[in-house]
Image (cartoon, helix red, strand yellow):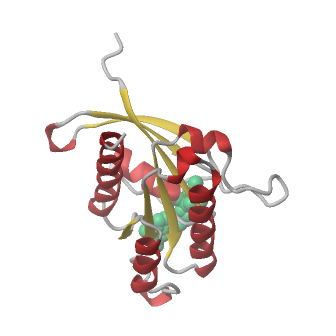
Amino acid sequence: GNQHKVEANVLLLGAENVGKSALTVRFITRRFIGEYGDIESIYSHIDKTDGREIALNIWDSLYPQSCETTESISDKQLQWADGVILVYSICDRSSFEVVRQQVQLIRSTRKLSASVPIIIVGNKRDLLHQRAVSSEEGRLFALSADCGFFEISAAETYHGVLLVFHEILDLIKESRALK
Ligand code: GDP
Ligand code: MG
């Protein structure tokens, strides 16, 4: 039978090439495989860490090509999501700007999504010599927008990725308790 009721829908957003797929695959398989292609997919996963079982769906999105649409997030995605992980690369300034825009878009679009839990992730922390966005800037922006914040390397460690997903699950639980 159907043992697990899905407890959370988590949407990954952000510019191209920032590591959304790397984060997703790292969380689900604990591995980093290097190349992921341009695949958009919703993965179902049972998280069994900490002795609890949580069923979640993870939507690993594709950043739309500018010609396809004017909005970088669809209503369908926002209605679906219980929590959002917004990813940028610490080496790519423009990807940080995309995250800023996407936060504004989520917070302003509709009543439902205005209060959706968001975590901002600065990925590729291993590439320190190419850093283009400081930790302080990332953290301060997240604070000002009422979002969680982590800097991680999906390439180097599983641990940071795990923290990100556990934090979004905790925030989703909290937000439900408030309703
Ligand atoms: P997406 O387009 O946002 O899904 O990005 P991908 O997950 O496909 O990753 C884009 C590229 O960045 C790939 O070549 C990955 O191997 C690489 N990448 C992802 N995460 C990291 C990281 O933490 N550090 C480094 N150095 N490269 C990464
Ligand atoms: Mg991808």
- Viewport quadrant of the C terminus: top left
For the N terminus, the image quarter is top left
Q: Position of residue 12 (x, y in %)?
A: 51, 52
- Front one among 104 and 25: 104
Answer with left or right where residue 97 lies relative to residue 118.
right
Q: Is residue 81 visible?
A: yes
Q: What residue occupies the far left of the structure in this picture?
A: 51
* Depicted 20 relative to depicted 143: above or below: above
Query: Ligand 2 quadrant?
Result: bottom right
Percent x, y of residue 125: 40, 76
Residue under the point 31% across and 55% down: 167
**Residue 75, percent across and down?**
66, 43
> Looking at the image, which residue sits at the far bottom?
129
x and y percentages locating residue 109 in the rendered image: 64, 53
Total of numbered circles in the picture? 0
Residue 35 in view in this figure: no
Could you tell whether 174 is left or right of 147 in the image? left
Q: Residue at x 47, y 50 (%)?
A: 116
Question: Which residue is depicted at the point 61% across and 53% down?
Answer: 37
Quick one: which residue is furthest to the right in this view? 67
Name the residue rendered at 53%, 53% in the picture. 114
- Quarter residue 129 falls in: bottom left
- Position of residue 101 in the picture relative to residue 158 (left or right): right
Q: Looking at the image, which is closer to me, 35 or 1?
A: 1
Q: Considering only vertical position in the picture, is 174 above or below 101?
A: above
